[in-house]
Structure formats: structure tokens, C-alpha cells
Image: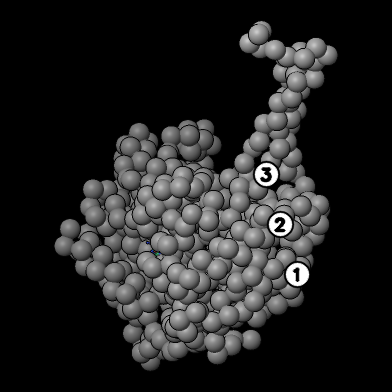
Amino acid sequence: MLKESYQLLINGQHCDSNTGETFVTYNPATGEPLAKIASASKEDVDRAVAAARAALETGKWSRYPASRRGQILNRIAQIMRERFDKLVELEVLNSGKALSAAKGQVMQAIEDFEFYAGATTTLSGETIPVPNGFFNYTLREPVGVCAQIIPWNYPMMMAAWKIAPALAAGCTVVLKPASLTPITALVLGDICLEAGVPEGVVNVITGSGATIGSYLAQHPGVDKVAFTGETTTGKDIMRRASETLKRVTLELGGKSPNIVFDDADLDAAVDGSLFGIFYNTGQSCEARSRLFVHERIYSQFVERFVEKAKKLRVGDPFDPNTHVGAVISAKQEEVIDGYVKLGLQEGATLLYGGKRPEGEAFSKGHWYMPTILADVTNDMRVAQEEIFGPVVVIIKFSDEKDVIRQANDTIYGLAAAIWTKDFAKAHRVAAAVKAGIVMLNSPFSAFPGLPFGGYKQSGYGRELALETLNLYTETKSVLSYIGEKPLNPFGV
Ligand code: NAP
Ligand code: MG
């Protein structure tokens, strides 16, 4: 299934970059090269945007009956189901994530297509009452050519979150996956074609974000940019997109609080908090990386949390028993280790981890142990900056108001988890935290259909939900005069 080399997908054709340039993508768990990937030039971007534009203007996709678009989205999902094991294998190879995590994410990608397959037929306008003699209706039209730029942490799932609603809304797409993990997005592009999406509707281009990503974000042929990635990249994209006032949706970073009250079910809170940070090797935008623990249960909770963290198996991503896979790159490993050292300088106490795991299994590739820093205060840099690795900081709190204030004392606002048996308190705190996604006594944050996105510098716009279709459509209001006498408003 893994090929030696992958080409660009432009206008339904596989092609090399016009410069012939390529780059190599690696297996993070071994550091070994996996495949050669075409490195698109700006001319290739122009061609991809032109193909998407032409496919949009002919209406060859948007004018399909909605039910037929839905049928094709279902067909994409069906092909993905048939090739599930192979897609999971490619995802694990290219991302180093644990098999169990990859399975869940590929399954969610499938379910996203199925969700939006159904959603296509919900898209419709309205008739709105207007003064006598007039008649109004609204149309929901595709927003146009969408540039979609995605990160490396959930390669296939992010591609699905982007492509599925765009196709449901009748848009055309130029998708740019992260350079570290381009393979499954390219494969998904092929599946779209195979399922019956017309040529030029989904184009996938690979290459440097700094060069072609930024070029795409300011391209005059693009109507909308949907981006998931770092907050700093998001700001740059927004600036570039403003030149032609493109529609922009941004899913950015986070430093999400995980709040454990003294009346929580301790076992559930320990297990959920563990998953909340160490799932996907901590490389999740919604990772609950700030763990607030009530002072009355602090020592008890922390002791159990550390004990359970020691049971997490780090290692071979293909081993079904592995909990924590590899870190994406050497650079990311360095960043993570740098933050842990910084935390110690800032006065944190290392309770577990803080280094690369030892042993033959870790002699190659990029790894970091689940790491727990205690005695952290919310003003430390390790509590304010996104680390994007398996590192949790523990902060002690004394009362509800105080923890809400601290939880909100961050530039981010993506997610928050709350552990308590007092449901009035749970809903009070859920209302008070500034976050787009709140989890009550649960570590899970995303199901198809539920809006996903952030407050503050975690971005704006919501993905994964019906309302996402609003962000892939424009509303056109059509007002007509239906009176018997001709109108003569100037009276001349
Ligand atoms: P990133 O460095 O911002 O890169 C994301 C994508 O943008 C990649 O495809 C990258 O291409 C491209 N890119 C880089 N510079 C660009 C520029 N100047 N203009 C246009 N595109 C550019 O993010 P990452 O390191 O891949 O991913 C980690 C981040 O994603 C974290 O901050 C995480 O919180 C965030 N994230 C958020 C969500 C969410 O839903 N809120 C979900 C997942 C991840 P190259 O790969 O070629 O550099
Ligand atoms: Mg990055």
C-alpha cells in the first residue's frame, strides 16, 4: 500500500511538481524514510487553484442534486471502510501514533464523511416575510474555492474535517497537508476521485507551508481559507487572506484546563485526566495540559495519577497494547525537552518522565516519556505556552472562583474538562470557562455533529457540525416586487 513516491493531485491528474522537486517523508518511530513526495511550486499552486476555480464555475459539483453529492460522500466513507486497515497502517507509519489512536481517528474521518453525506440535503434557503407587494427568498451558495491547510497531529482526520463539509456545501478544494505527514491526505484525494467526485473539485498539493501555504493563503483565486495549526501561523494566514478579504476559519492551539474538584469520582478523574493529556502522545490541540487539582484531594490524586502514568506503555506504535507512540520529529522532541527544563528552572517539580525513554526500542526515532510537572503556578511559561507533547503541569487550587479565574487566565480557549459529582457546580463552571468545548466527567471532546473550535486565540469558526456548512456557504437574499402596479419610487 505504501508507495515509493507520491505526486500532486491537480485536476484529477497525478503530476510531479513543475520544478521536479521532491522531499522525503519519514516514519517518526524509526526515523527511516518512507517515501518521496512532490514539492509543489507556486506555479503548481496556480494550476491547482485554476483547476478548483474551473470546477467551481462550471458547477459540475455544486449543481449535482444534493442527494447525489451525499451519495458520493457516503461512497468515500465506504471505500475508506473497505481499506480501513491499510489507511490505519499508513497513518501509523507516517505519524508514529499508537495504533489504537490511529484507528479511532480514521474511523472518525469516515464518520465525518457519513455525517456530511446526510447534511448535504439540509442545506436550503428560507422565505422571509416582507412588506406587501414584495417576495423574498434566500439561497445558500457555495462560498467558492477553499484553500485548506492542515497540521500533522491528526493527518487523516483533519483532512476529513476540511474536505467533507466543503464538498457537502458544493465548494471546490485545494488541500495542503503538513509536510511531516502528507501521505494519508494524498490517498484521501484519490479516494474522493474514485468515489465519483469530479476532476478538479478536490486538489491536493504538498510542499513547504512557508512557501506554498502562505502563497495559497493570499492567492486571489481563493475565496476561503480553512486552517488548522499553530496560532502564530493562523495570524499570518489571516493577515495574508485579508488582502482580498477571504473568508477565514481558524482552528489553533490550546492550553486547556482539566479541573478536578474534591468531590470528583477519583478513579474516573485520574483515568480521564491521563487520557486527556497523554492520548496522541500529547500532540493534540485539545490536550488538557493544565491539570488543576483541589487542595483537599491533591496528594491523593497526584499519587494515583503518577502511579497510573507509570503503567502507560510507550513504544512500538503498531503494538495494539501501546498507549503512547512516538513524537512527530526530532525538532518537536527538542521543543518538549526544552519546556521541561524550563519548567524545572521556573520551580516545578518533576514527578515522572522528563526524558526520552530508555532501551533498544528507542535507539531510533523520536520519543518522549509521559511527563508530569507539579508545583506549577499558572503564570509560569510551562503553564501558559502550548508544549504540544506528553507533558502535563499540575496546579493546586482552593475554591471554585479561584480555579475559574486561573482556567481563563490564558490567551487560549479551546477546551476544558471538569470533574465533579455536583452537577450544579459542573454546569456553573461549564458556563464560566471561556472555551469552545467543555467536557463534564468525560475525556472525549469530538463527535461528528458537535461544534468544535475555540474562543480567544484558539481561533474562530466551528468545524465538524451542521453550522460548519454556514462557513462554506454564502447567503444570497433575493427580493422581488410582485405588486400589480409598477413601482416608481422617485415619482417622476
Ligand atoms: P503549523 O506549523 O502551524 O502548520 C500547520 C500547516 O500550516 C502545515 O500544513 C504547514 O505546512 C502550514 N504552514 C506553515 N507555515 C505556514 C504559513 N506561513 N502559511 C500557510 N501555511 C503554513 O502547525 P503544526 O505544527 O503542523 O501543528 C500543530 C499545531 O496545530 C498546534 O498548535 C495545535 O494546537 C494545532 N492544532 C489545532 C487543532 C484545532 O482544531 N484547534 C487541531 C490540530 C492541531 P508545513 O508542514 O509544510 O510547515
Ligand atoms: Mg509547527
Disc 1 target residue: 195
Crowding near the residue tagged with mark 3, few <14, some 14–19, many ≥20 C-alpha atoms within 10 Å: some
Circle 1: element type: helix
Residue 2 in percent (x, y) is at 59, 86
Q: CA distance from mark 3 to mark 2?
A: 14 Å
Circle 3: element type: strand
- Farthest residue toward the front? 492
Q: CA distance from mark 1 to mark 3?
A: 23 Å
Disc 3 target residue: 141
Circle 2: element type: loop
Residue 345 visible in the current orientation: yes
Mark 3: amino acid: Glu
Residue 329 appears in which quarter of the rendering? Answer: bottom left
Determine if the C-beta at disc 1 is less than 8 A from ligand 1.
no
The reply to whether callout 1 and callout 2 are in contact (CB within 8 Å) is no
* Left or right position of 305 against 76: left
Disc 2 target residue: 58
At 74% across and 50% down in the image, what residue appears?
120
Residue 396 in percent (x, y) is at 30, 48
